[in-house]
Image (cartoon, rainbow, N blue to C red):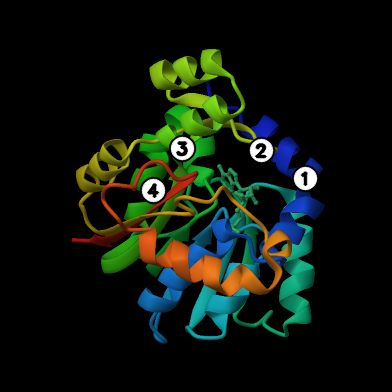
Amino acid sequence: MRYDPKSVRNRYDEIADEEDRQEKHHTLRTEIPREFIKKYLKKEDVVLDAGGGTGINAILMAKKCKHVTLLDISPKVLEHAIRNVKKANLSKKIDIIKGDISDLSEFKDGAFSFILCVGDAISYVLEKRFKAMHELVRVAKKGSILIIGCDSKYGFMRQSLAKGDLKEAISINKTHETYCGMGPRTHVYSIDEMKKLLQENGCAVLEIASTPTITDTVEKKPFYSRWLSLKKLEMELCKKPELLGIGNHLLFIAKKK
Ligand SMILES: C[S@@+](CC[C@H](N)C(=O)[O-])C[C@H]1O[C@@H](n2cnc3c(N)ncnc32)[C@H](O)[C@@H]1O
């Protein structure tokens, strides 16, 4: 299938309230990347949060760094981001822009020192992923950290098989594409594929994690008091080479050379 920005935008407009709820209510999908953001973000950083959603990561980052630009394709998601940023009293430190990661032409080369693109926008752009990665790396200055999150091919195959859908698992294996839960059509990556894409764009891969690895993307609620123990367990396992790849999402920490 070819990338259709209108259908991605419409889908996220429809699910903007649920997206806001998930970003605020600590799922493993959001919590594990946040640990890596904490590890790598520096106080002098100027950040691009691409596919930034309703702004919860942008708010966390703006409290620590110099400036954040949040870019997202969905006007409804951006309405939440504007409200959340205002409520956090961080409107002066966070710019909010409507845009598409496959065309960052409004930003100069090297405009940012830290690029965050988590939550799978790089999967939703389908065949435009080469252009999108080129753009994300182009707007990063030399030495910048890039944290890129994508949907995982083997994780999605595992999920289809868990539901008894062998036909879909075989199709994902062949096409590297499926529908992403409540989200749009998605290109699912193997580790080697994303590693190659980053390396071909002049980045060194520093770390790879799955988010989450052995639990499916769960919310805090069912785990109640055990949430912190579950998160600790997932953090311990998320970089194990023997497990990488079977998680729902993959997270790549890279450095522009
Ligand atoms: C699953 S949410 C993740 C939000 C946030 N980054 C997080 O991890 O919590 C994906 C977001 O990417 C946005 N998005 C999808 N495709 C995009 C594109 N091509 N350009 C910019 N934003 C995009 C969606 O509108 C949505 O807000």
Mark sitting on residue 135 = 4
In the image, residue 180 sits, relative to residue 35, either above or below, namely above
Residue at screen point 49% across, 25% down: 177
> Residue 37 falls in which quadrant of the image?
bottom left
**Residue at 49% from the left image edge and 64% from the top image edge:** 32
Q: Which disc, if any, is residue 155?
A: 3
Mark in front: 3 vs 4: 3
Q: Amino acid at mark 3?
A: Gly
**Distance (Cα) linking label 4 and label 1:** 27 Å
Q: With respect to residue 70, does 152 lie above or below?
A: above
For the residue labelled by badge 3, is the local secondary structure a helix, a strand or a loop? helix
x then y, percent, for residue 241: 26, 50
Please report contact status of discs 1 and 3: CB closer than 8 Å, yes or no. no
Q: Earlier in the sequence, mark 3 or mark 2?
A: 3
How many discs mark residues in the rendered view?
4
The yes-or-no answer for disc 2 within 8 Å of ligand 1 is yes
Residue tagged 2: 183
From the viewer's perspective, is the residue at label 4 or at label 2 nearer?
A: 2
Labels 1 & 2 near each other (Cβ < 8 A): yes
Mark 1 lies on residue: 15
> What distance separates the C-alpha of mark 1 from that of mark 2?
8 Å
Q: Quadrant of the C terminus?
A: bottom left
User: Is any atom of residue 150 visible in this view?
Assistant: yes
- N-term mark: 4 or 2: 4
The first of marks 3 and 4 along the sequence is 4
Q: Residues within 10 Å of mark 4 (few under 14, many from 20)?
A: some
Residue at horizontal 79 percent and vertical 70 percent from the top: 83
Residue 39 image-quadrant placement: bottom left
Q: Marks 3 and 2, Cα distance to the nearest angstrom?
A: 16 Å
